[in-house]
Image: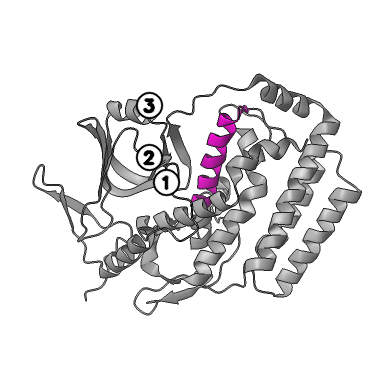
Amino acid sequence: MKGCSADRYRPRIRRVGSNSGVLVLNSNDCDWYQRSVYWSERANRPHEKGVRRGRRSQPLVLCGHGASLRIDAGTLLVRNGFTHYPQKREEFRLFPGAPDLPERIILLDCSGTISFDVLDWISAQGIVLVRIDWRGNVVCAIGNIGYSANRYRAQWQVEMRSDPQKRMAWCNALISRKIEGSIKTLEKVIPRSPAWELAMKRAYADLSRLELDPPRDIQTLRTIEANSAAAYFRAWRPIRLRWKGTGSRPIPEAWLTMGARTSPFALAGNRNAGHPVNAILNYAYTVLQSEVHIQAVTEGFDPTIGIMHEQSPGATPFIFDAIEPYRSEVDRAVISLLRSETLHASDFVLRSDGVCRLNPQFAKVAVAHARKAIENARVGLSLAGLDLA
C-alpha cells in the first residue's frame, strides 16, 4: 500500500458526473478508509438487548460530505454523507406518523443540503434537528422545541437566583451531586494510582466541606469545584491508550495516555482540543448539552435564567447548571469506549495548527456512546428534580 497523503484531514473529493452522486477521493489513504469502515460498522451495529426501542429511541446521526434532507412524495428522504472511498451511499426514508421515527436528527460536522420543506416536515413530526460543528459546539437546534416557559418554573428560577440563601443551598447541593458522580467514575473505570488516591481523598474532603461548612458565596464554591475537578482529571492522566500502526503513522507522545482536560489553545478554553480524549469529550458533552436543553424547554424552564452560572447575552446558563450532575455519566462512557478499543492515527486528524479532530465515523460512535449513557441516566425524567424540593 502506498503511504498516506500529507493532508491528514478528510481526503480531497471530486464529483463524477453532474448528478451521479458518486464521489472519488484524490487520496490513497488506505488507513483512513479502513478505520472509517471499522467505525461505520460499529455505529451501525444492532441495538444491544435491554436498550429501549421504538419511537423516540435512537437519533439518526449524519456525517461526511454531501449529506442531504429533502421531501419526496410526502416522505423525508435522508441521504448520509461520504466519509471514505469506496463507500455505498446510505439512504433513509422516513414516513409521517411512523412509530419508528427518530426523536433527533443530528448533523455531525457534515456538509450538504436541506430544503425549507424539511423544516416544516420535522416540526410536524416532533423531530428535532441538531447541528454540531467539528469543535463539538451546538450550532443550532431546529424543530418543535419553541420556548414556552411554565410561569411557575420560571418564577422559581428567578426567586432561587435572587435569594442568596436559597441560591447557595441549591448550588451547594448541585456541586455535591457532581462530585458524587466523579467518585462513582473513579471507582468504576479509573485504575488506581497515586493520582487516583489523591482524587478520592480530595472528593470526599470536598463533600464533607459542602455538608459541614457550606460556602456562602458562589466564588468560594467555584474554587472548591475547580480544585476537585482538577484532582479528578489528574487521575485520568496515567491511563495508557492502546494504539496500532504507529510505526507508519506516528502520533504525538502526549497521545499515549489520556492526558489533561485542558487545551493548549488557552483563549478557546477546552473547545479547540489538542488531544484525542478532549476532542471526544467535546462531542460527548455537546450531546448532553443538547439533550438537557431540549428537556429543560419541554419541562417549562427558562434556559436563560441561570442559578449558579451567570447570565450573559445569548447564553443559556440554566442548561450549564443542569448538566453538571450528569457530566460524570458521559465521562464513564468515553473512558469505557477508549479502554475497550485499540486506536489508530487515522481515527483522528492533527491539523497544521495542532488542533485535533475526529474521523467522522468515529465521532458517530462517540456520540452513540454518550447518548446511551444519557439515556441510562434517565436525564429527561430527573431534570425537574433539580429544584431539590
Q: Which residue is drawn at 74% across and 44% down?
A: 174
Give me the disc on residue 124. 3
Q: From the viewer's perspective, is residue 46 above or below residue 388?
A: below
Rendering coords of residue 39 (x, y %): 36, 63
Rendering coords of residue 346 (x, y %): 36, 66
Secondary element type, mark 3? helix
Quadrant of the frame with the N terminus = bottom left
Label 2 vs 1, first from the N-terminus: 1
Label 1 vs 3, first from the N-terminus: 1
Q: What residue type is labelled 3?
A: Ala
Q: Main secondary structure of the magenta part?
A: helix
Rendering coords of residue 242 (x, y %): 48, 75
Rendering coords of residue 64 (x, y %): 30, 50
Q: Which residue is drawn at 77% across and 68% down?
A: 198
Give me the disc on residue 99. 2
Decide if residue 272 is on the left or right side of residue 94. right
Secondary element type, mark 1? loop
Q: Give the range drawn in magenta.
A: 282-304
Residue situated furthest top in the rendering: 151
Q: What is the C-alpha distance between the residues marked 2 and 1?
A: 6 Å
Label 2 vs 3, first from the N-terminus: 2
For the residue carrying disc 3, how many other residues have a C-alpha within 10 Å: few (<14), some (14-19), or many (20+)?
A: few
User: Looking at the rendering, which quadrant does residue 312 occupy?
Assistant: top right
User: Looking at the rendering, which quadrant does residue 71 occupy?
Assistant: top left
Q: Are marks 2 and 1 in contact (CB under 8 Å)?
A: yes
